[in-house]
Image: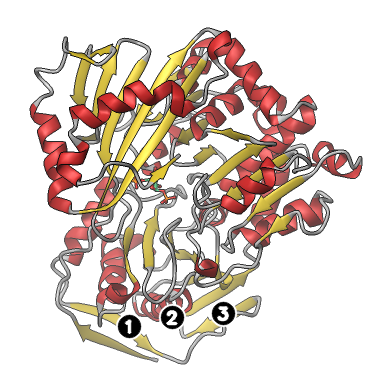
Amino acid sequence: MKIHRVQTTPFTDQKPGTSGLRKKVSVMRTPHYLENFVQAVFDARPDLHGGTLVLGGDGRYYNREAIQVILRMAVANGVSRVLLGRGGILSTPAASCLIRKYRTQGGIILSASHNPGGPDEDFGIKFNTPNGGPAPERVTEAIHARACELEHYRIAEMPEVDIDRLGRIQVGPMTVSIVDPVDDYAELMQSLFDFDRMRALFTEGRFSMRFDAMQAVTGPYARRILEEMLGAPKGTVVRADPLPDFGGGHPDPNLVHAQDLVQAMAAPDGPDFGAASDGDGDRNMILGRNFFVTPSDSLAVLAANAHRVPGYARGIAGIARSMPTSRAADRVARALGVEAFETPTGWKFFGNLLDAGRVTLCGEESFGTGSDHVREKDGLWAVLFWLDLLAARRESVEAIVRDHWRRFGRDFYTRHDYEGLQEDGARALMQALRRRLDTLPGQRLGDYTVTHADDFAYTDPVDGSQARGQGIRLLFGDTARLVFRLSGTGTSGATLRVYAERFEADAARHGDTAQTALEPLLAVAREVADIPGHTGREAPDVVT
Ligand code: G16
């Protein structure tokens, strides 16, 4: 087998964002671009030489071509075994599961998550470390540094590998083991949840569910587990076939992009339980009949009920949430007497806490929930957790959440996204806020008085690593909070995220909608950040 050493010019824009490198397909297809990044991964992770690499992606446009390139480069870089999902398919949590279960030296996951797919849309690539989690910043920085200085990459000359047949293929000195993408993941789910109890829900026939796979990677996982293993009627999983362009949709499980599901759940005879997941299967949205569970509440409810689910019946060690996620989970942690952590946005920041056994459950407002069973957020896991809870409590989704609010109080919560902004304007907005951090405390803004203002910084309690500039926080006493940050996952322009929350202990006031309860606070946000002035926008593009 011939190994070529191909000359390349460094690409300085290969800096991974919140979760890996995400670019337009056209950029990824620039000659040597993908190869440059992959070589940087191999160079930054010498353990892969002679080691095992997990490989797979969410099946989006360019997935199959990229898999072939990475296989050729893996041989050339001395990888001894690649564990590949059949057809190049692995959901992000399933990839994490494989990396951990087979104690590999890491994995390459091809996905741009909830971003649209297709020739003119997005592609992504990220490296996960042997703990199964997204590479921490010191690793992504090493990969980026290497990508900026590379002069050559190594690639083998070989025929295409048939990635659609299960089994082992020998490619020169390297073995490619093509595995069923669902098997190991399904087995892990069985070890955590009470499958008999959930099956009874369906077989008794008084319960109905709709799972929207959004024509993305979770379809095969949900079909196998919900319909084949748990006996949910065929058709429970809709839009179940993964498509390279996600059917032209935006595979983001939220109230805007999963409209069909939201409407189905609003019908008088709609299903009892609705759920959706995203492009690569790590996000989730939870709905009851005509009832939306915010991701922040979902984390808090799961934590408060974890003792009812077999995998967590022994109790949880602690709970972590990303900073912009509401503080609902902190109240549960306090009640349980366990530690609560507030980390920057990005699942990678949970890794050390999970590895150290300090936390069991983690969650983010961006429709991400997970636990120590893998090191990624896990969409279907969250859905199964809820399903097991519904089976255990035999109450509706809405009843469970309202009961939770009565016990712990309600954290009204919303996020407003202003998308496709001019980068200069968005940066200027953040800079202007930053300049006022010292003078804002004590000021009265609308109905609220600022008690604390900062640019969130985090010191990892396990290894002491630091992250700065993670979002502007304006605190208004213990009850209300505004957060401003720029998204780190977009591929063009800038996205401003404004997060608003307000705590309400009085159950008599829990009936308001989040938008009504938070409008005065959102008015403060518009004004204090001068959103119209900096962005030219009067209203957000997406409200969740
Ligand atoms: C990624 C990260 C999450 C983060 C989300 C949004 O999710 O893994 O931790 O919360 O992006 O990030 P941002 O607000 O910077 O756009 P995913 O599902 O895209 O991998």
> How far is mark 2 from mark 3, CA to CA?
11 Å
- Above or below: residue 218 compared with residue 528: below
Residue at the spot of label 2? 65
Q: Which amino acid does label 1 sit on?
A: Ile
Badge 1 element: strand
At a point 79% along the width and 32% down the height, the residue shown is: 391
Horizontal side of 500 relative to 237 (left or right) equals left
Q: Relative to 246, does residue 484 appear above or below in the rendering?
A: above
**For residue 59, side relative to residue 140 (left or right):** right
Circle on res. 229: none
Front-most of residues 526 and 423 = 526
Between 430 and 131, the one nearer to me in the picture: 430
Q: Earlier in the sequence, mark 3 or mark 1?
A: 1
Q: Which mark is residue 163?
A: 3
Q: Residue at x 29, y 12 (%)?
A: 447
- Quadrant position of residue 496: top left
Cα separation, mark 2 vs mark 1, equals 14 Å
Disc 3 secondary structure class? loop
Q: Name which of mark 2 and mark 3 comes first in the sequence.
A: 2
Badge nearest the viewer, 2 or 1 = 2
Q: How crowded is mark 2: few (under 14 residues within 10 Å), some or many (20 or more)?
A: few
Q: Position of residue 328 (x, y in %)?
A: 48, 21
User: Which amino acid lies under the numbered mark 2 shown in the image of this protein?
Assistant: Glu
Q: In this view, does 283 lie to the left or right of 540?
A: right
In which image quadrant can residue 437 be found? top left
Which residue in the protein does label 1 denote? 155
Above/below status of 271 relative to 57: above
Instruction: Compare residues 275 and 459 and report the one nearer the observer.
Output: 275
